[in-house]
Image (cartoon, helix red, strand yellow):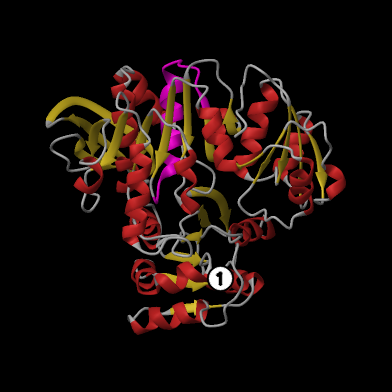
Amino acid sequence: MYQINLNNPCKAYFIGIGGISMSGFAELLHKNGFDVCGSDIKESKITKRLSSSGIHIVYGQNASNITDDIDFIVYTAAIHPDNPEYATAKELGIPMMERAEMVGQVMKNYANAIAVSGTHGKTTTTSMLSHIYLAAHKDPTISVGGILDVINGNIRIGHSDDFITEACEYTNSFLKFHPTAGIILNIDADHLDFFKDINDIRCSFLKFAKLIPEDGVLIINRDIENLSYITDNVKCSIITFGINDDKGYSAAGISFDENGCGSFELVKYGQNTGRRITLKVIGYHNIANALAAAALADYYKIPFEAIAGGLFAYGGTERRFQVKGSFNGVTVVDDYAHHPAEIKATLDAALKYPHKHLWCIFQPHTYSRTRALLPEFANALSLAENVILADIYAARETDPGDISSRTLQLELEKAGKKAYYFPSFEEIEEFLSAHCASGDLVITMGAGDIVNIGEDLINRHA
């Protein structure tokens, strides 16, 4: 297997360079002196930014793009062997690695490689940790699965031994990582187009935890079901967290301000430190995320002032309860939630946010997830006063013909919740324009392109 050495720059080619993670690591290698180039299907904000930094990008994936002076190739999981660039690279014998393998190889170059995993909350917790490390002047290298304002993007190149990254379980990607410290925020049923069931998912997280060396540490949520299945089978140190965890890191004296942002006193191993942490993000779920970040930072002996200061400085990540603007006095928020647990956490938090009436505009993400978790989706969405459904965002899947947003609409109505469905964004926008009143809160929700609805409404009424 080809080994990436940051001290020995060479020529790297990225197939699918415009992806959020691929682009970040392309930029990381470029800033470390590598000759980086790549391809994507079409131009985007991300590829424009990469081009402006000096990375050569071609649009369209053709065999002629692959030349024998390339030292190694990185490709995304979406690239198949019949891809012309992939096939040509194989013919030429150029070393190739999937994106997750590349991330794991980069991690080997850092003494403190921190991987943040969990079904939900990875981007937020990685961002919180990033703010803490920056507040402590630790000069970390950071890879985050969203756009983080403090680093003006999704990657930061530091000059220390500290590396912070997300670790996604889908297709067992995180099993290619090399963490010296890890966080497991939660374990829920998701990605059931890949995993067989929740037990298969638990097994994957156990394998991830086992990657951490004996002298490393695992920060894990005490509320995870059957926690001992993981904690009893790893050799590294274990630190737990949870809002009511009396044996690890927890929160006391929780309060919320007028915008739903949390504040709490940090409790460590059952002892209240008397030190208060104030957040600028909403909901109980973000208190839990903050506890995970604080526990890891404290393990590395980062001063409390930097922990509290970093957490207070974190104002959110793009598409995580992001206030986009307003139209006719209606506040528009966008959120990436696409799993029932995420939807419930976001709507619970939204109920504490100022509003007269709450409108949730939900775009289900993938047919397999919608089918597998249909009752759970209906239960979570029922928290919203008004629910509007858009068509399922197919992502990597093709329409099987037996599941749709109408199916979810019927499930909601069966549970006694009125829900609306419209087949086009234009119809949803017209409905909202006609029915929303000043003081209402509209949340566009999902991992697809549902964000366009709120942005269109804001621009149309500007």
| SS assignment for the magenta stretch, majority | helix
Q: Image quadrant for the C terminus?
A: bottom right
Q: Nearer the viewer, residue 354 or 351?
A: 351
Q: Nearer the viewer, residue 44 or 230?
A: 230
Q: Is residue 304 above or below residue 143?
A: above
105 relative position to 298: left or right: right
Q: Is residue 147 visible?
A: no
Q: Quadrant of residue 159?
A: top right
**x and y percent of residue 247 in the render?**
14, 35
Q: Image quadrant for the N terminus?
A: top right
Q: In the rendered structure, which amino acid carries the disc numbered 1? A: Ile
Q: Is residue 94 above or below residue 302?
A: below
**x and y percent of residue 128 in the render?**
42, 33
Q: Is residue 234 above or below residue 457?
A: above
Q: Quadrant of residue 122?
A: top left
Residue at the image point whose x is 38% and y is 73% from the top: 378
Q: Is residue 253 above or below residue 137?
A: below
Residue closest to the far right:
64
Secondary structure, mark 1, is loop
Q: Nearer the viewer, residue 69 or 39?
A: 69
**x and y percent of residue 332 in the render?**
53, 55
Count of picture labels: 1
Q: From which residue to which does the magenta span run?
A: 119-141
Residue at the image point whose x is 47% and y is 46% from the top: 168
Residue at the image point whose x is 55% and y is 19% from the top: 158
**x and y percent of residue 27 in the render?**
67, 30
Residue 138 counted in the magenta span: yes
Residue at the image point whose x is 21% and y is 32% from the top: 265
267 relative position to 220: left or right: left
Residue that numbered label 1 is attached to: 392
Q: Is residue 209 visible?
A: yes
